Amino acid sequence: MEPEIINNNMVNRKKMIKTKNTIIQIGKITPKVAVILDVVPVDSPILLSESTINHIQNRHPKDYARYGKYIAKIINTPDYVGLRPTDGTVVYVKEFTFENENVKLAVRATKKGVLFVRSLYVITESRLDNYLKKGTVKVLT
C-alpha cells in the first residue's frame, strides 16, 4: 500500500488520517539552504509521517509539546543549517527567543532519496556554539 501524501504546512494531527502510512509534505529544501549545503536539490519536498510524530513525542515529549507546531516554520525559516557528513542528515536549528531556546530538527533521506523529518529536540546554547565552531551548522544570512 502506497503512503498517502497530504500537502500541508502545519502539523495538525486532527486532519491527519490515523493510519500507519499517512505522510504530509511539511516543507521543502529552499534555494538558500540548497546553496549553503551544496548537495541537496532545491525544492526537494520534506515529508513528515505519523510514525515520526509518535517517535518525537515518545523521545522528546516536552520539546514536541512546545515546538511540534513549528516544524514547518523551522524548515522554512531556520537560523542555522548544516549537513552531517556521516549520514547526510540535513540539520535545521531555529532560535525561539520567546522561550530562549534553540530547537534542532533533523531531516534524512531514505535509500530512494526521499527526505523525511526524523527528530526534533531542544539543544543548549553551548551545543549550538560547538556546532558553529566545528562548522557542523552555518548561519543563514
Image (cartoon, rainbow, N blue to C red):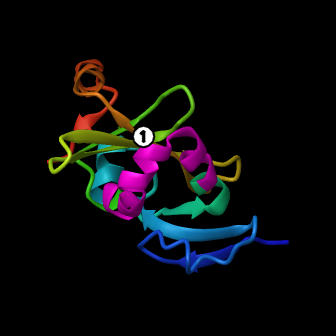
Q: Position of residue 119 (x, y in %)?
A: 51, 44
Q: Is residue 84 left or right of residue 52?
A: left
Task: Say if 56 sits above or below 72 in the image.
Answer: above
Q: Is residue 110 left or right of residue 1?
A: left
> What residue is drawn where x is 48% and y is 28%?
85
Task: Say if 16 sits above or below 140 in the image.
Answer: below
The residue identified by callout 1 is 121
- Total numbered badges shown on the rendered structure: 1
Q: Position of residue 8 (x, y in %)?
A: 47, 77
| Magenta-drawn stretch, dominant element (helix, strand or loop) | helix
> What residue is drawn where x is 62% and y is 53%?
54
Q: Is residue 106 visible?
A: no
Q: Is residue 137 left or right of residue 99?
A: right
**Mark 1: amino acid:** Tyr
Q: Range of the magenta residues? A: 54-74
Q: Position of residue 89 (x, y in %)?
A: 50, 39
Q: Is residue 103 magenta?
A: no
Element under disc 1: strand
Task: Say if 47 sits above or below 99 in the image.
Answer: below
Task: Say if 100 sits above or below 50 in the image.
Answer: above
- Residue 73 appears in which quarter of the rendering? bottom left
Q: Is residue 66 visible?
A: yes
> What residue is drawn where x is 27% and y is 19%?
130
- Residue 22 appears in which quarter of the rendering? bottom right
Q: Is residue 67 magenta?
A: yes
**Local crowd at mark 1 within 10 Å, few (<14), some, or many (≥20)?**
many
Q: Nearer the viewer, residue 4 or 135?
A: 4
